[in-house]
Amino acid sequence: MSYVSAHVLDAGAGRPAAGIEVQLATADGRRLASAVTDADGRVSDLGPDRLPPGDYSVTFATGPYFAAQAVGGLYPRVDVTFTVAKDEQHYHIPLLLSPYSYTTYRGS
């Protein structure tokens, strides 16, 4: 299992958001990994098996997702910055998305 995973749900449409590009990067912007959400809106393998403590970001390319559905939106991408603590086992970054709002939390 990857140290970081993600899940995107399209709250406006009431379904998983498939086909969204997701990138993992260091605090200084160095890209570590990228993947695309599957039919269930999940990315189960995003990055290495371990990350050293520090700040990282997961970027969700939401603009192309909404454009492919001919839906306007406010956020062309969503950047979620989080801190990796020493001795943590896994980070799951869920995103609840709609064209004009989003929310995220620490998943399990």
Image: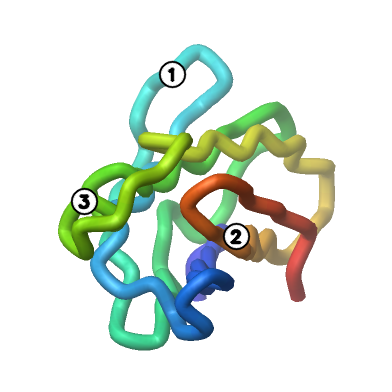
Residue drawn at (54%, 35%) of the image: 79
- Rendered image quadrant of residue 86: top right
Front: mark 3 or 1: 3
Residue drawn at (24%, 67%) of the image: 19
Front: mark 3 or 2: 3
CB contact under 8 Å: marks 1 and 2: no
Identify the residue under disc 2. 95
Please tell me the numbered disc located at residue 29: 1
Q: Position of residue 106 (x, y in %)?
A: 78, 60
**Residue 24 is at least partly visible in this image:** no
Please tell me the numbered disc located at residue 62: none
Type of the residue with mark 1 = Gly
**Residue 94 is at least partly visible in this image:** yes
**Disc 2 packing (10 Å; few <14; some 14–19; many ≥20):** many
Q: CA distance from mark 3 to mark 1?
A: 25 Å
**Disc 3 packing (10 Å; few <14; some 14–19; many ≥20):** few
Nearer-N-terminus badge (1/2):
1
Nearer-N-terminus badge (3/1):
1
Q: Position of residue 5 (x, y in %)?
A: 53, 65
Please tell me the numbered disc located at residue 67: 3
